[in-house]
Image: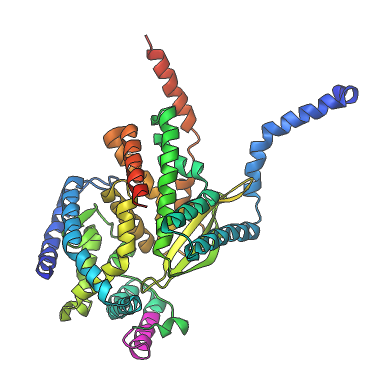
């Protein structure tokens, strides 16, 4: 090593580079674990605030048709949600029961399904106030941000967003409405459906549902 | 409608006994799925053909602010349920706060139509009998869908009886108005659940089980929840198992 460094510094640098690439994944995890809790909470809260502000701006823009509004809220979701992680968390161990083709089909259809749902959810709260409340750091390094929807019923509706840090920022990996995690809920649903009619049936059902919803606008 | 609800109430203790005798195997969340699905679909039809249309009419003739205010009035009236089940869990502070809220909101808040108590710093401590039984260590038991009442289990079923008995509305026949008004308020969520679910029955069951578990646990929100954490772990051996499967398939190729 030392010999080569003296004789050939270029090569040594190259090796270091290769080495750092190899250990990079470990460092990436270390970053999450050694994260300053206050910074993490603030960053995650900012991401949620940006997401909600963007959605509210779309909802309040009177010049948009309802179809455009739906598309725009979907775009906001695409920007701030980590669909790859969400999909894998939902399928969990069932992931391996899907063929390569089924996997990519599922990712596409499920992403569409979630975006449609997210857009619709927020449209239902058009007249309400959305407030970002506080945040907590999870043991895994994720951050959960609590938001409140005020004015729809006797009580505020509590919506928690769970975010995970990637190199390019914080991304939503779950939405927990009044204690009900959507990841967990969809996992239970897909498990039962795959158990009944297999992965192909699940994807077919999802596709039909999306087509029907999209045509309805 | 109310006679059916009454019938359901009468049936409940019998069902609870049955459930206790059969001793459904733990770990399986829904051992009576076939029966549950049938009752669920019956309830869903009752909703689609009676409750939903009526609540739509109600929403048409009332302003939204009025419906939300009325929801608050009905909630205020359920004060005895919250008071007793707070004290039953040793939550003196919660019970006290609920008592003060009831006094303030019933008077200054015009029967609870407004909520000045919250602005005075009197927090809500939402508890019911099912949650109290849960806190006592009574297990929920198998998932049940009760006719008209909806998703439940033996523990929450008994809780429902006590909740109903301690709700003043029960004795003035106002329960039906509360249900119609509540359904009108929940309309967007119900529509969404029907539309967004891949299997509406499983969607509702899972949401119910998660929600009740969260309500019973009473954990401080600011502390990280270890139980929730493993939901978000991507299983490390996911791809290893997959490789095994590939190998197996390859080996089976003649």
Which is nearer the eye, B172 or B16?
Answer: B172
Image colouring = rainbow
Which is nearer the eye, A65 or B1?
Answer: A65
Q: Magenta segment, principal secondary structure?
A: helix
Location of residue A34 with respect to A41 vertically, above or below: above
Of all residues, the one furthest to the top in this rendering is: B254
Instruction: Classify residue A33 as left or right of residue A62.
Output: right
Query: For residue B102, what is the image quadrant?
Result: bottom left
Q: Looking at the image, which residue is at 14% across and 62% down?
A: B13
- Magenta span has B191? no
The magenta segment is: B96-112
Instruction: Classify residue B248 as left or right of residue B4.
Output: right
x, y (%) of residue B66? 32, 79
Location of residue B70 with respect to A5 vertically, above or below: below
x, y (%) of residue A193? 30, 39
Q: Looking at the image, which residue is at 32% across and 41% down?
A: A208
Location of residue B41 with respect to A53 vertically, above or below: above
Instruction: Classify residue A173 as left or right of residue B101.
Output: right
Q: Looking at the image, which residue is at 41% across and 13% down?
A: B251
- Magenta span has B103? yes
Which is nearer the eye, A116 or B8?
Answer: A116
x, y (%) of residue B86? 34, 74
Q: Looking at the image, which residue is at 34% across and 33% down?
A: A199
Location of residue B66 with respect to B210 vertically, above or below: below
x, y (%) of residue B112? 33, 83
Residue A177 in view:
no
Instruction: Classify residue B155 as left or right of residue A149.
Output: left
Query: For residue B52, what is the image quadrant?
Result: bottom left
In the rendered view of the protein, which quadrant contains the C terminus of chain B? top left
Of all residues, the one furthest to the bottom in this rendering is: B107
In the rendered view of the protein, which quadrant contains the N terminus of chain B? bottom left
């Amino acid at each position: 090593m030392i010999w080569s460094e003296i004789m050939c510094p270029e090569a040594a640098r190259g090796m270091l580079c290769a080495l750092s690439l190899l250990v990079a994944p470990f460092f990436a995890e270390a970053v999450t674990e050694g994260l300053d809790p206050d910074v993490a909470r603030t960053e995650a809260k900012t991401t949620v605030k940006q997401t909600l502000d963007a959605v509210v701006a779309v909802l309040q823009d009177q010049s948009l048709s309802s179809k455009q509004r739906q598309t725009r809220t979907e775009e906001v979701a695409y920007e701030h949600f980590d669909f790859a992680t969400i999909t894998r968390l939902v399928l969990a161990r069932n992931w391996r029961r899907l063929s390569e083709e089924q996997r990519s089909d599922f990712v596409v259809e499920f992403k569409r399904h979630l975006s449609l749902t997210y857009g619709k959810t927020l449209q239902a709260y058009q007249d309400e106030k959305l407030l970002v409340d506080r945040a907590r750091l999870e043991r895994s390094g994720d951050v959960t941000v609590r938001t409140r929807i005020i004015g729809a019923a006797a009580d505020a509706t509590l919506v928690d967003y769970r975010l995970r840090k990637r190199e390019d920022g914080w991304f939503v990996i779950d939405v927990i409405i009044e204690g009900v995690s959507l990841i967990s809920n969809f996992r239970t649903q897909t498990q039962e459906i795959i158990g009944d009619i297999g992965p192909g049936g699940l994807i077919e059902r999802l596709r039909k549902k999306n087509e029907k919803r999209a045509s309805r606008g | 409608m109310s006679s059916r609800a009454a019938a359901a109430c009468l049936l409940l203790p019998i069902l609870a006994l049955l459930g206790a005798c059969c001793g459904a195997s733990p770990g399986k969340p829904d051992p009576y799925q076939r029966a549950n699905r049938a009752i669920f679909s019956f309830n869903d039809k009752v909703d689609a053909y009676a409750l939903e249309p009526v609540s739509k009419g109600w929403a048409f003739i009332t302003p939204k602010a009025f419906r939300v205010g009325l929801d608050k009035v009905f909630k205020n009236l359920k004060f005895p349920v919250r008071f007793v089940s707070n004290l039953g869990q040793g939550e003196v502070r919660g019970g006290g706060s609920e008592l003060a809220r009831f006094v303030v909101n019933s008077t200054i808040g015009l029967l609870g139509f407004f909520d000045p108590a919250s602005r005075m710093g009197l927090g809500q401590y939402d508890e019911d009998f099912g949650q109290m039984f849960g806190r006592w260590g009574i297990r929920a038991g198998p998932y049940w869908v009760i006719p008209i009442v909806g998703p439940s289990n033996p523990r929450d079923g008994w809780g429902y009886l006590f909740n109903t008995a301690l709700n003043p509305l029960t004795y003035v026949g106002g329960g039906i108005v509360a249900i119609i008004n509540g359904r009108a308020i929940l309309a967007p969520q119900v529509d969404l659940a029907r539309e967004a679910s891949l299997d509406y029955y499983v969607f509702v069951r899972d949401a119910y089980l998660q929600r009740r578990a969260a309500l019973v646990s009473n954990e401080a929100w600011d502390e990280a929840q270890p139980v929730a954490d493993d939901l978000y772990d991507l299983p490390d051996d996911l791809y290893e198992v997959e490789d095994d499967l590939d190998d197996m398939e390859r080996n089976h190729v003649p």
